[in-house]
Amino acid sequence: MPTHPSSQQVAITGLGVIGATGRGVAAMDQALAQGRDGLGRLDLWQCELAADFPVGQYRGNLDNDLREARPGTFAARGGDRLLQRMSRSDKLSMVAALEAVAQAGLTATALAEGRTGCYLGQSVCGTLQSEQAYAAYRGGARRRETLMALFQHEGANGPDHLADVLGLPGPALSFMTACSSGANAIGLAAEAIRRGEADIMLAGGGDSLSRIAFYGFCSLQVTSPDGPRPFDAARRGMSVGEGAGMVVLESAAHAAARGARPLAWLGGYGHSCDAHHLTAPHPEGHGALAAMRQAVSRAGLKLADIGYINAHGTATQDNDNTEALAVRTLFGENAVPISSVKRWFGHTLAASGAIEAAVCVRALQQGVLPLNLGLRELFAGAGVDVLREDRKAPGLRHVLSNSFGFGGNNAALVFSRAE
Amino acid sequence: MDIAVTGVGVVSALGGDPAAFAAGLRAGTNPCVMREFTRMDGSTVKAPACLAVTAEPAGLIEPRKLRRMFRLARMAAVAARQAVTMAGLDLSALDPTRVGVVFGTSLGSLETTQKFLDSYLDNGERAASPLQFMNSVHGVLASQVAMDLGATGVNLTVSQRDISFEAALAQGARAISEDRADVVLVGGADELTPMLHEFGSRLLLFSREAAHCTPDVQARRPAVVPGDGAAVLLLQRQGARPLARLRAACVGRCNSKGADVALLALREAGIGGPDLVTNGRNGSARTARLFDRRERLLRERAGAVAFVSHRGQFGEYPTAGAQQAAANVLMLAGREVLAVPGLAAAPATILHDGASASGGHAAYVLTANA
């Protein structure tokens, strides 16, 4: 059972998280420890649906977060002029990225002069700004700022801002595979390190709340008036959320050479497409199963090595049925403890897989599996060991994290404990 | 890296299939026309544009499937099917988990995004359209193509402005070279909608001058002639009938010191100086400065002497690089020169040097099939 770095493992040396639980990994830890969800009423704009469906909204002041961020690269290279050009989604990603970089102990010089890049998963990007611009334009606004805001729709803004502020000379790309984007970005960044294309990659996902996302998921009738209850018999759907998760990935050799202590290892990445339906998963979970199997196999592990599964667990009927089916098909009935953290954060779309990567790393570090908040009665026939409370797992070595998205896009990541 | 390119598909202003596209390039056709765009206030304006012709999907995609596709996905799916047909592949005989789809798009489906926005702005938030919502997500482009082809392997959408396609090409190539796929359809697609044209022309990014309706990429105009379309390359580890070979595909930042990815791509391909360099020069003064600098560097460091961009015949849009890639493959496959002034002999090696004004940089090397 490998718990040491191998040629297939990539070190995680920094974590950054922002979302409904607050800013930072410490705030996330605290919320998870207290069993306190981050759901509440949407107040980024006024709308009727805000009264019907809670959301996972970040309540802090992002501009102040960035002005105060350490290392001081944002103030030096961006400052207030850049803040005016950044979407809310960009700011969420930047806050998480700066936290991850600070934890990794990377200096501005090390980032700018090293073989470094960033992969950012996004889904709705800056549409909170572009949809406002469009509505204003329809109403007669013709100012340049209104016109320019339409281009917040472009996914490239997020990685470009990260590359510019952090001085990253390597690839800076946006991956858009809906709600699996963050996990795919992390998996693909790890592959880039394994190939030797980079020594350090900043990777993760970020998305802000927007009318498109909130009204869109409401229109699909998959949002719940009482918040998500993943795997519950009476579950009624998700809560849309916002946030960002970023990790610093580093080759084992590079981390060792600079004396950086890995927080965990990223051992395997699996990816597949259902090619079945735009919004519904394959009813037999073929794609989910393939992604999980690949991730475990590429980590050089056996299925029995996995000690915890962080579920995608959106609390929609389709997702939870299919994910449970795929998990019990692959691992066996009630074989591996599983939980979804969607009630803490809401479904943060592209950010979800990246935030959940941070949850997995913290579970490995602390030896505690997070409970599946919101569960009252497991749905009949689920056949999976859903965690009703936090569970101590001092021997935890390897965990699997699932992320699934529109278009049947599936990603799975395997994380291993750093001794 | 040594990957076979066995198929090409193109839906472009030059034509709705690879044969029409190649014929248009060969003849130096100017596809630009003065089009009438209807603005949101109901007024109309005429402006030069290179809109992709309506693709002829007969025999390629079932009408039932086509009806469910928005314009951007339809262009992408038709181009993907054309590439499969050109490669002579029977997809039903392949393991679908080993067939991947990787697309680049900068703006995704603006048409469906606008329809979704209109649905709640016109009728209230409770009347937002679920159909338009699900199709407004960028990643749905690759998913639609995968659903049409039954491809359950790697499925990615990359969005990085002018290097979206080139970055997708690098990802698709890696999937094959790392044995995560046997076949990958790599494409690029973006669309010009009346809304985008309205915003772009008000920002003076898009030309409204009839005199600019020419394919002159060496001009240094204040604005570009916009276009749209989709193009796909079919990559295989080994192909029965390779059209060309992909020898390197690299991505980075063009403002980085000492890490020029075009030079890196040449090194990886084991090529000193390419016969031809293609790039994204598009007739605008803004990108002219960028490509002047890039061409100077490649002359000095790689001995490159022949440079060309066919974007004047595609119209400018972020993933027009996919059409350039299709043109490059066809040049290498046919061993002919497609409207390349100053290049007498057919090229055997082509370096594409893609760059974005915001700093993205991507390059690939294609060679003729030996």
Image (cartoon, helix red, strand yellow):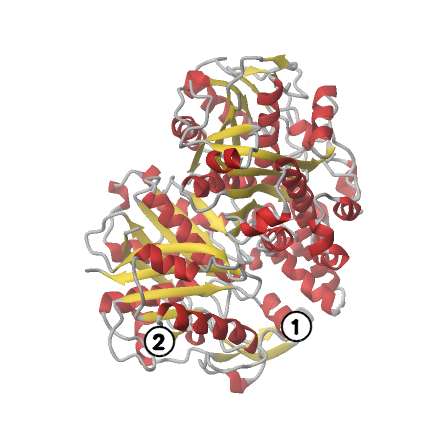
- Badge 1: few (under 14), some or many (20 or more) residues near its Cα, within 10 Å? some
- Residue type at numbered disc 1: Leu
Residue A283 place in picture, x, y as percent: 45, 29
Q: Is residue B187 left or right of residue A206?
A: left
Numbered circles on residues, count: 2
> In the image, is residue A377 above or below residue B266?
above
- Pick whichever, B121 or A95, lies toward us: A95
Residue depicted at x 68% and y 64%: A148
Residue B159 falls left or right of residue B180 = right
The answer to which image quadrant residue A344 occupies is: top right
Q: Quadrant of the C terminus of chain B?
A: bottom left
Q: Secondary structure at mark 2?
A: loop
- Relative horizontal placement of residue A290, taking residue A397 as reference (left or right): left
* Residue A117 versus residue B339 in the image, above or below: above
On the image, which quarter does residue A239 sit in?
top right
Residue A93 pos. (x, y %): 65, 45
Q: Is residue A183 visible?
A: no
At a point 51% along the width and 36% down the height, the residue shown is A257
* Residue under the point 48% across and 75% down: B292
Task: Say what secondary structure mark 1 lies in.
Answer: loop
Q: Amino acid at mark 2?
A: Val
Q: Is residue A302 visible?
A: yes
Q: Which mark is residue B305?
A: 2
Query: Percent x, y for residue A382?
Result: 52, 17
Looking at the picture, tell me which residue is in the foreground, B91 or B127: B91
User: Foreground mark, 1 or 2?
Assistant: 2
Q: CA distance from mark 1 to mark 2?
A: 35 Å
Of the residues under marks 1 and 2, which one precedes in the sequence? 1
Q: Chain of mark 1?
A: B
Q: Are marks 1 and 2 in contact (CB under 8 Å)?
A: no
Residue under label 1: B203
